[in-house]
Amino acid sequence: MPLIEIKNLHVSVQGKEILKGIDLNMNGGEVHAIMGPNGTGKSTLSYVLAGREGYEITEGSVLFDGVDLLKMEADERARAGLFLAFQYPMEIPGVATATFLKTALNAKRRAQGQDEIDAMEFLNLIKAKTAELEIPYEMIKRPLNVGFSGGEKKRAEVLQMSLLEPRVAILDETDSGLDIDALKVVSRGVNSLRSEARAFLIITHYQRLLTYIVPDFVHVLVGGRIVESGDKSLAELLEAEGYARFEENEAA
Amino acid sequence: MAATQQTVDAVREVETYKHGWETDIESDMAPKGLSEDIVRFISAKKEEPEWMLEWRLKAYRYWLTLADQEPDWAKLNYPKIDYQDSYYYAAPKLGDGPKSLDEVDPKLRETYDKLGIPLLEQEMLAGVAVDAVFDSVSVATTYKKKLSELGVIFCPMSEAIKEHPELVQKYLGSVVPYSDNFFATLNCAVFTDGSFVYIPKGLRCPMELSTYFRINEKNTGQFERTLIIAEEGSYVSYLEGCTAPQRDENQLHAAVVELVILDDAEIKYSTVQNWYPGDEDGKGGIYNFVTKRAACRGKNSKVMWTQVETGSAVTWKYPSCILQGDNSSGEFYSVAITNNRQQADTGTKMIHLGKNTRSKIIAKGISAGKSNSTYRGLVRMQPKADGSRNFTQCDSLLIGDQCGAHTVPYIESRNPTAQTEHEATTSKISDEQMFYCQQRGLNAEEAVSLIVNGFCKEVLQTLPMEFAVEAQKLVGISLEGSVG
Amino acid sequence: MTKLQTTTGQVFGDTYADAVGALPGAQETWINGMRKTSRALVGAQGFPGRKVEAWKYTSLNQVEKVPFIPAAKADDVEVSSLPLGIPVIDGALKMVFVNGVYRGDLSDSFADLGDGVSLKPFADVLKSDPSALKVVLGSSAEACQSFTTALNTGFMEHGVVIHLAKNVVLERPIHLISIGASGAEPGAFHPRFSFSLEQSSSATVIESHSGLPGQAYLSNPITEILLREGAALLHYTIVGEDSDAFHLGRASVTVDKNAKYESFILSLGGQLVRREVKVSLEGLNASAIVDGVYALSDKQHSDITSEILHLAPNTTSNQVVKGVLGGESRGVFQGRVHVAREAQKTEGRQLHKALLLNRGPEVDCKPELEIYADDVQCAHGATTGEMDQNHIFYFLSRGIDEETARALLVEGFLDEVMFNIGDEAVRETIFGLVSNWLARQKIAAVSGS
């Protein structure tokens, strides 16, 4: 059974159809990339999978490990192992990053019937993870994402992902706003999490990120539909030629 | 450490308002209503000296002239209070009073256990001595001996009146005079007990002093009177916390707190107020009219008020600072949470009289349900307050579209070298913030609690550790049911 | 004849009350009723003192004590003696009122304003077509919602009624010039200015309030403004009353869907000046700017009190008021921003800053947010204090003397708001008035004095 099974997914926002029938299966161990020009529904797809309100699913289904994902609340999906790395991570004033991480980790542990994490254990875990991702330890004492640079925010997202160990991770434009060094660090973090039990959905506008996180499959999303799928060479082709020919097809 | 953990666990257990029960103790009550006879009864019951009775009567007679001057400028709506329909004295029967914790009525102890304040373990709760006030009479005092060795006086007000009349006569009413305002005047006439604290010159009080208030009898007006005196160069941190049992009738509370701070002395006064707020339809709940004022009389006197107001149906409360001594400073940190039909009109007054005085106001208001929360605060720079500074930050958070959040600052300056700065914002928890937290696995209530705690952090972090933990839990508990 | 009684006695003398019966429009029951209700209210409550929350910082006790008479009979007043002359705004059409009475001989002709523009003296409309006033005057209850309005309504007679038809764009600004001048006895007058702008019409209106030295006078002007869908009004009010004079003025503005109200108040004081402005944003996307500056000296008292009511979704308001206080003056700013439950997506911003130039003045400020909708962005800020010593030092270090430095800094402080004045000619005039004011002050150092 695929980890994620999207069938004929149609989604509207305020009466306007954004996704017009998406079919996509993802298995454990696979990295899928979704590429496409701006405004074609890439972020919509990530938000719908994560359970954000304001999207009307008019048709289709999504199964997560065989269970109807669309019936679950956003927090249930998260606790079940679905993680979204936001394009624009939210700032939450006054809430220390460490407090937030611990709260999120414990929410997941409780859901899995585990005890809450011991304070020392958490401290050691977080120290190891921050070192791995080259995140200054001081950063986790600061309020979550408040005053973080673009790069720091993205690193903090990867830190959360690494801590929560999701089964399905969606990375929404994680490369936007990153310089090359930050991009390398973030990519290394993601690559270290690749495993047989885990699937990645990487949403990006550019091919750049995909040279560091090499995908198994590349899908082109244009006008709310996946118009072509292929392997990593498709990404290179797109980088060279752009999306023009798909858009022409779409128009026709 | 174990005791703290127990407190934490006890508070966690409180899901909605679990502090709503009645303890069945036969009370010793004065008849209903207010008259000179009642004032005399209270004074006699307390075995007070003549001068105390005279002061009470003076206040009572003055109060009668204020009949139509019950303050009406606050943004509060409550039915007219019939002051003759209330009891003004109730005491739990305790025989000769407990000599030690073991002698405390087990029922009372059980009550405190439910509240998460296990008296038996108070001694283990390092650094905290408790003067527990049950209804109007103090029933247990710990650490008294240890404190008295240091020259600290920490006792019920009724005892201080008898044992330390010279101090009481000198300071009682010197910060909040009997003619101060309608509610304070009423308090002067009928107060039954409260705490008295005296910190001698140069002493840094080694433990936090704490009083937990409880209202128990039906229709009991609760009129606490607290007086704290910090002599030159001394320091004390005082904690006040309270919960009340569930009621249908509204209960009146009009407390007065006076702080006297001399040269180079400092008082830190923290309150967590979690009285019964009434039910979802606004039925029942405490009416809380409080006059709290600190007089920074000396050079470099310092006061810090911190309050976390989550309870009561109606809150009318403006802990104030009179910054008289040069270089004295006043700080006010407040979190006011209203839910359902609660109403809070609370803030502070900073009166800058001396040179180079400083004040800081951080007020966070959270409104949910059909409640209304108002920040009302005065900053006044008098002509001699050269070089003084004020900074005020008021932030309001609305949860839902049926509540109200209001900010009413009064800023008055008569000194060009003094500076005031006031900022206020109003916002809601954004859908994006909620979604972000939920995407990380937090349910809606956990997310609200986390975000609101973050919003209040600047205030909560000024609380002593034991209180901070309790207060954080309360923030979440108070807002339960506010998100759909 | 009704006498106006207050808690402390009569408001105005018998002569004052007697004059009332003769006011035009008395034959109309509703106008009569409105006047009566208003006078009764003023009589019953008296002039507000500091115990009334809205008048906490501006007590009218001293106004109440003056035995005013109706300041009619204005024809023989010589206005050329006005200390600063009649203020001139380039390109604007002048309408002059002396003691509230329209003076054609001093005004520009307003015969050829073009189609769709109607401009009539208020007294004429009261006599000939009073029902035309129903919409602008509203109900008795509205007339009584503030003391200032009630006092005016009780005695309203003169003023102007301006109406713009749909889509009319009035190119020339209209400049209403009100001049107070008492004879042997102190006089009071209550002009009423009314503007209705129909759908998508637009105009610029300036009000100047000044007066002659001599006996104190009380100017009590009310401006009513109705902006229909998509209409736009620039409204400027310049108050520079005589140093003995009282001014109790109010603008009451209704803003419909997509309409814009943009205003600026300059108060250079009088003995006691209170300018009230109430803006009701009643339609979707309605917006308002309610800026102001006050500059005071001697024992002047000036109060700007505003109420901005957000009553519909997506409404926006912005307010910046700055004050400079010298002498032993007293400046008051009160500003209430109210957001009704249904007014979601509202944005309301308010800022008040006051600079005290020396020892002696007092500033009192009460900004107020009253919010009943959750999806809003509202903020206010307020500061009081003196000039930044570091800034002064910087000027000194560049060889500029301290007095000049201070004058420049005060000007800079005020410029920030004045730059936002949309109409260029008005902006020039206001800059000029403020420069003159500054030139008359001695802005000496505060510290160490």
Image (cartoon, rainbow, N blue to C red):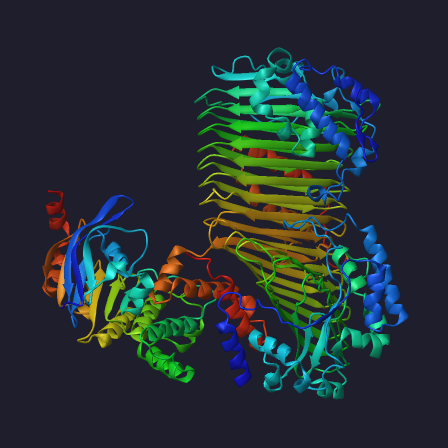
Q: Is residue A147 visible?
A: no
For the residue pair A37 and B10, the one nearer the viewer reads as B10
Image quadrant in which you'd find residue A147: bottom left
In the displayed structure image, the side of residue A106 where residue B453 appears, left or right: right
Tell me: residue C265, above or below residue B141: above
* Residue B16 coordinates in the image, percent (x, y): 50, 65
Tell me: residue C248, above or below residue A152: above
* Residue C267 coordinates in the image, percent (x, y): 66, 37
In the displayed structure image, the side of residue B188 where residue C175 appears, left or right: left
Image quadrant in which you'd find residue B179: bottom right
Q: Residue at x 74, y 81 (%)?
A: B97
Q: Is residue A23 visible?
A: yes
In the displayed structure image, the side of residue C340 where residue C265 appears, left or right: right
Q: Residue at x 28, y 67 (%)?
A: A83
Hey, which residue is sitting farthest top in the picture? C128
Tell me: residue B395, above or below residue C240: below
* Residue C175 coordinates in the image, percent (x, y): 59, 25
Q: Residue at x 18, y 60 (%)?
A: A34
Tell me: residue B182, above or below residue A123: above
> Could you tell me how many numbered marks the image carries?
0
For the residue pair C355 and B432, the one nearer the viewer reads as B432
For the residue pair B319 and B194, the one nearer the viewer reads as B194
Question: Could you tell me which quadrant the C terminus of chain B lies in?
Answer: bottom left
* Residue B407 coordinates in the image, percent (x, y): 59, 52
